[in-house]
Amino acid sequence: MQKDQLLTRRRLLLAGAGALGAAGTAGLLFSGPSDTAPARPAAPAAGAPASRPHKPSVYRLRPLTENGPTRAVPGRTPVRREPILRMSGRGHHMFLTFDDGPDPDFTPHILDTLAQYDVRATFFVCGEMADWNRDLLARMADEGHVVGNHTWSHPLLTELGRSRIRTEMESTSDVIEEAYGERPQWFRAPYGAWNRAAFQLGAELGMEPLAWTVDSLDWTTPGTGTIIERIEEGAGAGVVVLSHDAGGDRSQSVRALRTYLPYLLDQGYHPTVPRRALG
């Protein structure tokens, strides 16, 4: 799907999917068994104002390159009834995620900023975009980012049958494996519209469903300052932030990251990537 088509379809489907996407503002701990919905904790507290300049050496994470630790293979993937909205873990870890790419106009700038601060993020890619931009998936692998599955053409899954959903997921996983080097372990439904088939098929393909805690709504192009404010005010331990690196003009998202990322680091947050539990 072309970028302008994706943006138009997103606007048309916003009302129908809004109720499901809004659930991302409440938190879920990534822990419980697959057939029991996890408990919802309180909303994250807003970050305190910045008080000192950023010192990269204090916050740097070790890159997950070929010389890094071997990635553990998780056990059997559970079938969930709800997506994971929030990650558990020690410390002030946060999870930055970017949807709909990779886009050659915007994704490289986001990767450049992440590399500047030695931070890892998760990119939920659409198969057709990944197929056109395999070099960007290779760069994500080299720089230690996680790549997740966001379907092939960004459809509303609740309007599709099981066979079409499987095709959307499986073809995207195939491209990711070819370009990134391994099959994805995480899946995100377009528009945040989940159904039973999406959970079941995702699990069959070895993927956990990851939604979000804080929606920057950057796809509405509300202004760079508004995006920054939403993310900084929603900052908290375990928070998953939703942004976009494709699907339209993402220059505001690119500029916002350059401001809120050093702010989060100055506040003691550690942006990182999700880890799968071993089975």
Image (cartoon, rainbow, N blue to C red):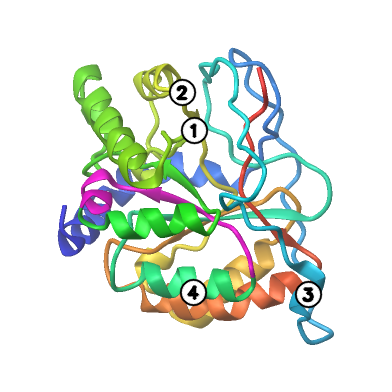
Residue 248 in magenta stretch? no
Q: Horizontal placement of 259 versus 249: left or right?
A: right
N-terminal label among 1 and 2: 1
Indicate the amino acid at tag 2.
Gly
Is residue 80 among what the camera can see?
Answer: yes
Category of crowding for the residue at label 2, using alpha-carbon neighbours closer than 10 angstroms: few (below 14), some (14–19), many (at least 20): many
Q: Nearer the viewer, mark 3 or mark 1?
A: 3
Q: Which mark is residue 206?
A: 2
The residue tagged 3 is: 57
Residue 112: numbered disc? 4
- The residue wearing badge 1 is 185
Disc on the earlier residue, 3 or 1: 3
Q: In front here: 107 or 175?
A: 175
Q: CA distance from mark 3 to mark 1?
A: 30 Å
How crowded pointer 3 is (Cα within 10 Å; few <14, some 14-19, many 20+) is rated as few
Q: Are marks 1 and 2 in contact (CB under 8 Å)?
A: yes
From mark 1 to mark 2, how far is it between C-alphas?
Answer: 6 Å
Range covered by the magenta-colored residues: 118-131
Q: Quadrant of residue 270?
A: bottom right
Q: Are marks 2 and 4 in contact (CB under 8 Å)?
A: no
Asked where in the image residue 134 lies, by quadrant, the reply is bottom left
- Taking 70 as reference, is 170 above or below it? above
Kind of element beneath mark 2? loop
